[in-house]
Image (cartoon, rainbow, N blue to C red):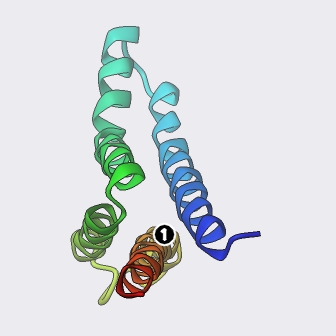
């Protein structure tokens, strides 16, 4: 099987799984008191980071380089926001699949484009 294809789909599936895992944490909003409207609003607010990552995934599906850069930037932003480097080191475990997916998108992009460049020189 083609290694580039495996890299591409591994990055996509890992990012999808990580986004779905992140969205699971927002389901606790239904345990709180309040009307259905306030619960749905809370669900939307809790899922805004996941929806942003979903938009990045859609971009990465077509433009692997920019998608990889944005996934890595979003991961670093989340790490800073959640104080992953100082007080909340356990959050690094949750953030690693995003960082790995971003790196896989970049590796896939460079591997697929290096083959095109070498074949054009011949």
Please rate how many residues cluster around mark 1, counting C-alpha atoms within 10 Å: few if below 14, some from 14 to 19, many from 20: many
Residue at 28 percent of width and 34 percent of height: 45
Residue 33 versus residue 84: which sits nearer the camera?
84
Residue at 52 percent of width and 29 percent of height: 31
Horizontal side, residue 122 vs residue 75: left or right? right
Mark 1 lies on residue: 101
Residue 26 x, y percent position in the rendering: 45, 40
Element assignment for label 1 = helix
- The quadrant holding residue 5 is bottom right
Q: Is residue 20 above or below residue 68?
A: above
Residue 39 x, y percent position in the rendering: 38, 20
Residue 42 versus residue 80: which sits nearer the camera?
80
Horizontal side, residue 77 vs residue 10: left or right? left
- The quadrant holding residue 68 is bottom left
Residue at 50 percent of width and 25 percent of height: 30
Q: Specify the quadrant that holds the N terminus.
A: bottom right
Residue 24 x, y percent position in the rendering: 55, 43
Label total for image = 1
Extreme-front residue of the structure:
122
Q: Specify the quadrant that holds the C terminus.
A: bottom left
Residue 115 x, y percent position in the rendering: 47, 81
Q: Is residue 99 above or below residue 70?
A: below
Residue 100 versus residue 113: which sits nearer the camera?
113
Q: Is residue 4 above or below residue 40?
A: below
């Amino acid at each position: 099987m083609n290694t580039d294809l495996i890299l591409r789909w591994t990055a996509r599936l890992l990012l999808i799984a990580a986004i779905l895992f992140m969205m699971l944490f927002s389901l606790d909003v239904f345990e709180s008191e309040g009307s259905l409207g306030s619960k749905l609003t809370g669900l939307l607010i809790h899922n805004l980071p996941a929806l942003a990552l979903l938009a990045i995934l859609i971009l990465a599906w077509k433009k692997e380089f920019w998608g990889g850069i944005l996934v890595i930037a979003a991961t670093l932003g989340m790490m800073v926001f959640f104080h992953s480097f100082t007080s909340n080191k356990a959050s690094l475990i949750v953030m690693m699949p995003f960082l790995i997916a971003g790196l896989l998108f970049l590796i896939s992009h460079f591997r697929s484009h290096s083959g095109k460049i070498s074949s054009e020189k011949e």
